[in-house]
Image (spheres, grey):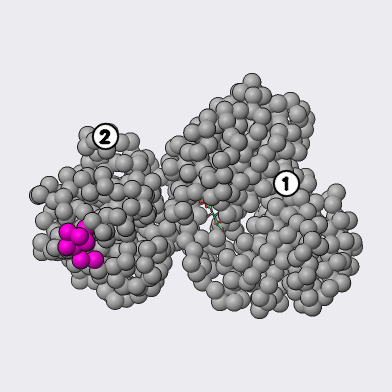
Amino acid sequence: MCGIVGFIGCKPAAPLLLEGLAKLEYRGYDSAGIALVENGQITIHKAKGRLSVLSDRIRGGDGIEATVGIGHTRWATHGKPSDENSHPHKSASGRFAVVHNGIIENYAALKKELQSDGVEFLSETDTEVIAHLIERSYTGDFLAAVRAAIQRLEGSYALGVLCAEHPDEFIAVRNASPLIVGLSEIGNFIASDIPAVLAHTRRVIPLADHEIVRLTRDAVTVFDQAGHPVEKKEMTVDWDVTSAEKGGYDHFMIKEIMEQPQALSATISPRIDADGGIVLDGIHLTASQLRKVNRLFIVACGSAYHAGVVGKYVIEKLARIPVEVDLASEFRYRDPIVDEKSLVIIVSQSGETADTLAALREAKRRGARVLSIVNVVGSTIASESDDVLYTWAGPEISVATTKAYSTQLTMLYLIAFYIAHKLGRIDDRDQRRLLSALIRLPDMVSGILRQAGELKQLAQRYAYLEHAYFIGRNLDYAVALEASLKLKEISYIHSEAYAAGELKHGTISLIEEGTFVVALACCEKLIEKTMSNIKEVKARGAEVLVLTTDDNRDVLPEADHVLYIPKTNDLLMPSLEVVPMQLLGYYIALARKCDIDKPRNLAKSVTVE
Ligand code: F6R
């Protein structure tokens, strides 16, 4: 949610800021802006709309000589998308400019206080108070003014601040919104996420909460909350630069769907040792500690929550421990019965989702041990958890998650096998059998991806429908939740997922001639039951697409169209089922000419509540 960048160095800043913002557009794309220090003054260029509107307006920064600047791409929270509400925001004298990612919770009180001092506001944003507060605290010491201002702020903020009187430096701050520093040959950067600096450097310093950094052309100094310099460790990013590029694909989403076999292998392989045992590098839980755990919680948002629903079925089935799956936004406020006997599994691609982070803190406050499954290395959720297991999906840029979800499933399978084995609920032979099925998933997914052409064709048939229902039982239902979200978020088709047996308790009244129903029928022991539900909707005129396994070739005469996928262990079927569902959502959205990588009203990394 909102992306910020900053640069100071020996090259013109404007093109570098635009280039960095282009890599952060997945975080917000309703307006964009940059601020530069030129001839002792701050110049701001900003525009409502996609980054391309701003970039065209200033011809890609061509001819702008300034070598220090900050930039922002916005996902509106306070005030509608408009030129005025776009960042950067200036202080009244024009001496300071600020870009901000996060929410200032006490901004209304601060605004009132500043207005009663005669300050005039030009925008509806919460961010503008920060520029005015810095101005009010300024007596010639830039760093001190920023430090004084942030002491008044409540909420979350990653900030970049420019001062017209200090053209050889800029300052950045982090509190509960992500921020990294990039160190390069041409100068120093800040950014909300690594891809923004990857074209210039792999040397990165992730900042911790409450740290302030002063950047000059040849130095970066990090200070703690009390103003003491902090020694920070540099991290070398080993991603391939092209991993954050589209690499010939039309959209990041399809590229990331196609990358799933590699992402799965990268997540599974390092976790299986030469003797065929599981090595969960980030877990330090012993069998005796596990025996004390009487309840497991999986807490997450969106697709990560859907992965958690799969996790519940699999962990309960194998480890026989009760598992509750919770939406993080509900868990944090529902006074959950969590204590030191609970193990809380937090699932998050970004590792920065505000509700998920708050749920993690709530669980820890109540004494639970927290194990997180995270994709972004060094993210806040990873750094605050007791144990971390990384999904090695690589950077995920598309707003709609695909490869991160798939690797989350894999990690949950490994955790289920690990816990079940440690507790003696499965023996060595069972574990070996499950692992050998798990190892085969990447190849099986590759095979399914070869059916993309069939799905592209099929998508033409469903592209103009306005409603869809995804039904299934048990693990098929868990996948239906994700399949339905994939379709609706990028194609804007209204879609719902239902446990197939639940349909007749109300929702079946919506099924009429031509209603689109996707039935997931891969769960072997329930196939007959799901078939009955297919017949029920078919009898009411539904157009039914069934997803099932190869061995069911002649058992589904009721369907209008059947998609076949190979069969694996029942518990692992979700990893295969989700792939055609991702492709279906993608190709339907493509046929509807939707902006697939930047769906309306959405942004990746939801750092607001
Ligand atoms: C949907 C999607 C979201 C995220 C959710 C959690 O395609 O991507 O539903 O799954 O916002 O995000 P993370 O995993 O970063 O916590």
Q: Position of residue 600 (x, y in %)?
A: 50, 69
Q: Position of residue 84 (x, y in %)?
A: 29, 71
- Given residues 54 and 442, the one toward you in this image is 54
Would you say the magenta stretch is mainly helix, strand or loop?
loop
- Given residues 330 and 472, the one toward you in this image is 330
Q: Which residues are magenta?
A: 114-121
Q: Circle 2: is it few (<14), some (14-19), or many (20+) Cα within 10 Å?
A: some
Task: Write down which quadrant ligand 1 falls in.
Answer: bottom right
Instruction: Please name the residue shown 22% across and 45% down the image.
Output: 147
The residue most toward the top is 288
| The quarter of the displayed image where residue 578 is located | bottom right
Kindly tell me whether mark 2's CB lies below 8 Å from ligand 1.
Answer: no
Instruction: Please name the residue shown 40% across and 54% down the image.
Output: 195
Residue 50 is left or right of residue 500, and the answer is left
The residue wearing badge 1 is 572
| The quarter of the displayed image where residue 373 is located | top right
Which type of secondary structure does the marked residue at label 1 adopt? helix
Give the quadrant of the N terminus.
bottom left
Question: Which amino acid does the dot numbered 2 rest on?
Answer: Val
Residue 99 is left or right of residue 142, and the answer is right
The residue wearing badge 2 is 230
Of label 2 and label 1, which has the lower sequence position? 2
Question: Which amino acid does the dot numbered 1 rest on?
Answer: Leu
Residue 204 seen in the current view = no
Q: Tag count in the figure?
A: 2
| Figure check: 174 above or below 40 | above
Residue 88 seen in the current view = yes
Instruction: Please name the residue shown 79% across and 61% down the image.
Output: 505
| Figure check: 212 above or below 487 | above
Instruction: Please name the residue shown 17% across and 63% down the image.
Output: 118
In the rendered image, residue 487 lying in the magenta stretch gets the answer no
